[in-house]
């Protein structure tokens, strides 16, 4: 039952409709035929009783003279005629007999079973009831059921014999069975017809639904441009659904177009905003050193010839320093603004790290800080743009050194795992506040004085161009760990880009 | 006035002939009971039509159920000719003065037999086995269907009523055969001519019966005429009957009825029947079957 329900759920609409049509028709036919057949059975049974009573009555009338004449053969021929019937083929009389006052057979339609003189006993089953001047009792227990009728043979008001007739219902069952077969065949035919009609109707109804499904698939695949409305001219629910679907598709197309345009506008405005912001930041970064240069130059100009040489030299030094810083800012900015695609060649990451640490040895020593290099096992060289990665690591290590208090230590560790080369730069500085971690790699977000504000942004961009990633793990008061991961081998697309570049 | 005298004479003769030919001089009524050939109504009609045509008379067929009814018709002169049984002839000859007209002849001659038959699967092998049984006679005035078995019993001092358990009359040899076949009765005595004819017409019926006794030959049931039938009519009819075998249509009709020819027969041929009747009469007084009271009124 459950399986049937389950499978019914998985049926197509056509199968469901066909099955439902058939089932309803079969049910109706079954109910109607059952009631009709029971009515017919009652009618036939009543008709048989009428015929039985008539036959017995007539037999009693016909028998009188023959009994008087003791013409037993004549009596037998009458009984035989009663049993054979009117020749209409339907022999419903099971037996006919005439018995004398003692219930002994004068003649019986089955002489070999009931010879003359034998006692014809009453079938002791069924309820006796008076019926049309005779007696009728149904031997319902017998199979096939037989109705027995008896009627007196009367001459001059005196009963001289009794006419007996049995009406068999055995023809009733074949008749009913024949009708049942006919009804069954009709039900099958109607059921099949119902299934066919169901299939046709469902086919007609599911065609636009399939079309809707295909259209929905196209929309799901992102194909909103094709203007192919679902056609269903009938003004029924499916027609309304198709109409709404078409409306939905149109609106979806419009809203997607609007969204695309809005997106483009947003990108444009964001770019403009970003350019403005960038220009502002750049201007801000430039203004400080430029201000210092202008102030030093003014002081130089205002100084009398008596001014001490020391002062002049100091001011000139300031100008030179600030000019150099301006140069750094502009160089970094150019690098950031016009990034060069990496040219990746196999190099040892440990070697790059060693070179970077070596180049900074002087700085660390001067600040009383130390760098602890922990180079891990390197199974394979890493395909990288050596200059760019050197710049990334240099930026990171310098930042770490700057964040590290005097006497502190910066740890640089390398490792290879999962086809990538990783470099971790850790310091024990103050850590980065969480709100700043989010925009750590955006340009001009530097918190320290003296930088270009582009170091981490450039580092992020270079690593990203290598297909790698930069991760930050920083806790206030504990320090910061920055992990750079670069795939050992460039992705095919990257290589393609390299070749193209 | 010889011519006038002659004319008067002719007129007188005509009147005489007319009066002699009963009510309707042109009509001939022939009675046949179905005892002989049941279901042969068509054949009877053909025979009657043939006789009427050949004898130049307006012949009509009168069918009756029993020989008694035919005897009554002969007694009242309501029929002129009758196909009756040897016993009925013997009685009616004595009582009513009926006369023999002609008798059919079969291959064996103008004779037939009485068969005692039982159902084919009956264990009974002889007449003696039918003691207490249900037995069918064909007609109280039938020789083969009543007198022969009654005579056989009378010779041993019995009557049918005493010997059999239940007797009845079927008023037809064919019906007696059928009554045995369907086991309505345990036995019957029938005319050999009818039985043999039935064997051809209804073999299925005859197959269900078996002959346990065959009597000596008896004169075949004759055609008789009523007393007072004008002799020239009788002669004319006899001439037609005896001439049938020389006439193609007559021969065909004879063949259809299973006869070789019609021939003359002498009244003395029936002395055997008369003797049997006397034996039976010792038990019945008049040699006729006693009417049997209905069981219900006994």
Image (cartoon, rainbow, N blue to C red):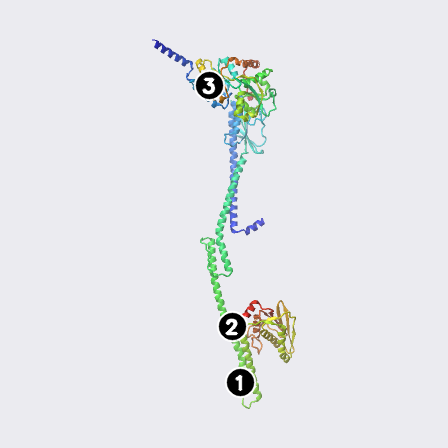
Do the residues indicated by labels 3 and 2 lie within the same chain of the protein?
A: no
Label annotation for residue B86 = none
Q: Secondary structure at mark 2?
A: helix
Q: Secondary structure at mark 3?
A: helix
Considering only vertical position in the picture, is A305 above or below A150? below
Instruction: Estimate the spatial distance between the alpha carbons at disc 3 and disc 2, rounded to whole Å.
Output: 149 Å
Of A11 and B20, the residue lying toward us: B20
The residue wearing badge 2 is A274
x and y percent of residue B116 in the render?
A: 57, 20
Visible residue check, residue B55? yes
Residue in view at x 51 percent, y 76 percent? A280
Proximity of marks 1 and 2: CB atoms separated by less than 8 Å: no
Label 1: few (<14), some (14–19) or many (≥20) C-alpha neighbours in 10 Å: some
Label 2: few (<14), some (14–19) or many (≥20) C-alpha neighbours in 10 Å: few
Q: Chain of mark 2?
A: A
Proximity of marks 3 and 2: CB atoms separated by less than 8 Å: no
Q: Nearer the viewer, mark 3 or mark 2?
A: 3
x and y percent of residue A481 in the render?
A: 62, 72
x and y percent of residue A153 in the render?
A: 53, 25
Q: Nearer the viewer, mark 3 or mark 1?
A: 3
Proximity of marks 3 and 1: CB atoms separated by less than 8 Å: no
- Image quarter hosting the C terminus of chain A: bottom right
In the image, taking residue B241 as reference, residue B159 lies left or right, namely right
Considering only vertical position in the picture, is A261 above or below A366? above
The residue wearing badge 3 is B246
Visible residue check, residue A158? no
Instruction: Estimate the spatial distance between the alpha carbons at disc 1 and disc 2, rounded to whole Å.
Output: 34 Å
The residue wearing badge 1 is A297
Q: Chain of mark 3?
A: B
x and y percent of residue B289 in the render?
A: 54, 17
Do the residues indicated by labels 3 and 1 lie within the same chain of the protein?
A: no
């Amino acid at each position: 039952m459950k399986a049937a329900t389950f499978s019914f759920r998985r049926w197509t609409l056509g199968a469901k409709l066909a099955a439902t049509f058939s089932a309803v028709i079969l049910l109706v036919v079954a109910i109607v035929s059952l009631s009709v057949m029971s009515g017919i059975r009652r009618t036939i049974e009543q008709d048989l009783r009428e015929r039985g009573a008539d036959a017995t009555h007539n037999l009693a009338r016909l028998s009188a003279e023959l009994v008087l004449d003791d013409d037993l053969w004549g009596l037998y021929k009458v009984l035989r005629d009663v049993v054979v019937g009117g020749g209409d083929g339907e022999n419903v009389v099971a037996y006919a007999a005439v018995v004398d006052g003692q219930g002994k057979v004068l003649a019986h339609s089955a002489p070999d079973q009931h010879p003359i003189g034998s006692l014809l006993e009453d079938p002791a089953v069924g309820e006796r009831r008076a019926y049309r001047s005779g007696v009728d009792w149904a031997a319902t227990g017998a199979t096939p059921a037989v109705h027995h009728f008896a009627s007196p043979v009367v001459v001059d008001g005196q009963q001289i014999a009794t006419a007996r007739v049995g009406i068999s219902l055995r023809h009733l069952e074949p008749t009913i069975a024949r009708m049942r077969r006919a009804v069954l065949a009709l039900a099958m035919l109607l059921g099949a017809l119902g299934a066919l009609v169901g299939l046709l109707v469902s086919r007609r109804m599911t065609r636009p639904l399939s079309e809707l499904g295909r259209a929905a698939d196209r929309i799901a695949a992102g194909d909103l441009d094709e203007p192919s409305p679902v056609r269903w001219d009938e003004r029924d629910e499916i027609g309304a659904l198709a109409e709404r679907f078409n409306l939905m598709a149109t609106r979806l197309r419009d809203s997607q177009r609007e969204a695309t345009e809005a997106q483009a506008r947003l990108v444009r405005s964001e770019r403009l905003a970003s350019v403005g912001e960038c220009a502002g930041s750049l201007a801000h970064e430039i203004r400080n050193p430029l201000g210092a240069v202008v102030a030093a130059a003014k002081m130089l100009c205002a100084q009398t010839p008596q001014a001490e040489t020391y002062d002049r030299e100091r001011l000139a030094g300031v100008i030179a320093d600030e000019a150099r810083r301006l140069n750094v800012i502009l160089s970094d900015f150019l690098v950031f603004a016009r990034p060069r695609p990496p040219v990746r060649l196999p190099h040892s990451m440990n070697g790059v790290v060693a070179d970077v640490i070596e180049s900074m040895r002087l700085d660390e020593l001067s600040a009383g800080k130390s760098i602890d290099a922990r180079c891990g096992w390197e199974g394979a060289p890493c395909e990288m743009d050596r200059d760019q990665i050197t710049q990334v690591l240099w930026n990171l290590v310098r930042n770490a050194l700057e964040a590290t208090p005097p006497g502190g230590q910066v740890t640089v560790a390398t490792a290879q795992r999962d086809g990538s080369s990783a470099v971790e730069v850790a310091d024990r500085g103050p850590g980065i506040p969480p709100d700043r971690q989010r925009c750590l790699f955006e340009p001009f977000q530097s918190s320290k004085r003296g930088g270009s504000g582009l170091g981490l942004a450039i580092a992020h961009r270079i690593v990203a161009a290598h297909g790698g990633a930069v991760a930050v793990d920083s806790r206030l008061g504990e320090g910061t760990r920055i992990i750079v991961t670069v795939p050992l081998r460039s992705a095919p697309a990257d290589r393609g880009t390299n070749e193209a570049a | 006035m010889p011519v006038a005298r002659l004319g008067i004479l002719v007129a007188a003769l005509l009147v005489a002939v007319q009066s002699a030919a009963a009510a309707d001089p042109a009509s001939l009524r022939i009675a046949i009971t179905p005892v002989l050939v049941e279901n042969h109504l068509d054949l009877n009609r053909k025979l009657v039509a043939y006789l009427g045509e050949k004898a130049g008379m307006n012949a009509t067929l009168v069918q009756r159920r029993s020989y008694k009814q035919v005897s009554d018709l002969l007694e009242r002169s309501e029929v002129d000719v009758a196909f009756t049984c040897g016993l009925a002839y013997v009685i009616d000859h004595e009582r009513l003065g009926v006369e023999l007209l002609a008798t059919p002849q079969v291959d064996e001659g103008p004779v037939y037999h009485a068969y005692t038959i039982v159902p084919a699967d009956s264990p009974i092998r002889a007449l003696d086995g039918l003691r207490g049984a249900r037995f069918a006679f064909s007609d109280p005035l039938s020789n083969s269907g009543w007198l022969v078995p009654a005579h056989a019993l009378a010779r041993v001092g019995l009557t049918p009523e005493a010997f059999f358990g239940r007797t009845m009359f079927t008023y037809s040899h064919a019906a007696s055969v059928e009554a045995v076949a369907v086991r309505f009765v345990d036995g019957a005595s029938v005319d050999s001519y009818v039985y043999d004819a039935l064997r051809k017409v209804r073999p299925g019926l005859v197959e269900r019966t078996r002959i346990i006794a065959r009597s000596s030959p008896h004169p075949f049931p004759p055609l008789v005429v009523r007393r007072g039938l004008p002799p020239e009519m009788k002669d004319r009819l006899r001439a037609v009957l005896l001439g049938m075998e020389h006439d193609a249509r007559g021969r065909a009709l004879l063949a259809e009825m299973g006869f070789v020819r019609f021939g003359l027969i002498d009244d003395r041929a029936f002395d055997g029947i008369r003797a049997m009747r006397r034996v039976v009469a010792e038990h019945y007084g008049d040699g006729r079957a006693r009417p049997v009271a209905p069981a219900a009124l006994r």
